[in-house]
Amino acid sequence: MGFSAENPPRRLARAALHATVFLLSLMPASAQSPVFPAAARPLFRDPVHDGAADPVVVWNPRAAAWWMFYTNRRANDPAIPDIAWVHGTRLGIAESRDAGATWIYRGVAAIDLPPALGASATITHWAPEIVAHAGLFHMYLTVVPGVFTDWQHPRALVHLTSPDLETWTYRSTLSLRSDRVIDACVLRLPDGRWRMWYNDERAGKAINAAESHDLFTWTDLGLVDLPSRRPGEGPKVFRFADAFWMIVDEWRGLAVYRSADAVAWTRQPGENLLARAGAGPDDASIGNHADVVVNAGRAWIFYFTHPERPVEGEPAPGAQTRRSTLHVAELVLGPEGRLACDRDASADISLLPPP
């Protein structure tokens, strides 16, 4: 991804934003009221392929902006057969300078992978996970070694690092449960260990876990003992309201699990999150593969939809049903401690830079 030198007006604007977010960070949370407009609807639509999905949102301190990395699929090319349209693309990047309310396209991530993982022209990047630690960003990326017309091909999770979120260095290919692993999520536990959750497609799309003390070397822990054995993907684990939560994409909304220790999980009863159509533009479909950002005591879920696909039943054939857009809504703790989400409510998002 190339970046041109900033002109003086842009440098001044960036300095002003730095000053604003610094002053906000000094204020107590109770005094920090939203200073930006409600989130756009839809939040973001990729201008190149129209196939944005699987977002992960991270603060970029050098740019003084929020960045969103996302899977991109070639949704607007009707000539691509079968499922080849979800292959053959690099990660897209969008940027927000108004605390998450609106996003603009930045380009694609500069990721160089070794030839053993596949030809650079056709290699596929899916479902990034990014964590910041000790001045370095770590990405765990799903890599598919080419463009395929069916799902029966290897996939791997690779570890990359970057000092600035712009240029990524390959570190390793993780040795995990099988040769078809996808959708990493990483969280630091209270005792300092790092826990990874991922999808093992060889095991019926079950959620597995791995553990690390340094983010470089991982030990596979095997199958996560979830109360239900329903297949799913895109696990996202986060801490909110004095509990650990896991959401899993079951292709009929997002299943919710709760835990006191991120080991023993209880499934939230009732309907999945984002299982019913929303009323907003491009939101009348189920919510898919999401990220959650907990910020200043509030939790925000970033998810994608296929706007032309019905909530129930098979979508009509054609390229139009392939397109996908990104959205955001607030997660709240509702009655009886249930995690809830009103996707039709105005998202008065105002993300603060992390301390």
Image (cartoon, helix red, strand yellow):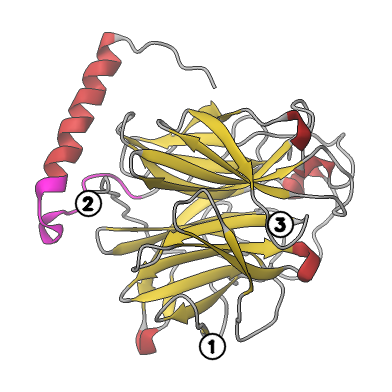
Foreground mark, 2 or 1, reads: 1
Question: Do the numbered discs 2 and 1 sit on residues whose CB atoms are within 8 Å?
Answer: no
Q: Residue at x 86, y 52 (%)?
A: 317
Q: In which quadrant will I find the N terminus?
A: top right
Q: Position of residue 188 (x, y in %)?
A: 40, 61
Under circle 1, the secondary element is loop
Magenta span contains residue 350: no
Q: Is residue 38 visible?
A: yes
Residue denoted by label 3: 181
Q: Earlier in the sequence, mark 2 or mark 1?
A: 2
| Residue annotated with mark 2 | 34
- Label 2 sits on what residue type? Pro
The segment highlighted magenta reads 25-38
Q: Is 143 drawn above or below residue 317 in the view shown?
A: above
Is residue 317 found left or right of 132 in the rendered image? right
**83 relative position to 30: left or right:** right
Magenta portion: prevailing SS class: loop
Judging depth in this view, the residue of 175 and 247 nearest the camera is 175
Which residue is rendered at x = 39% and y = 39% of the image?
136
Magenta highlight on residue 33: yes
Disc 1: which residue: 269
Q: Nearer the viewer, mark 1 or mark 3?
A: 3
Q: Find residue 207 and report its horizontal and vertical position in percent.
A: 64, 70
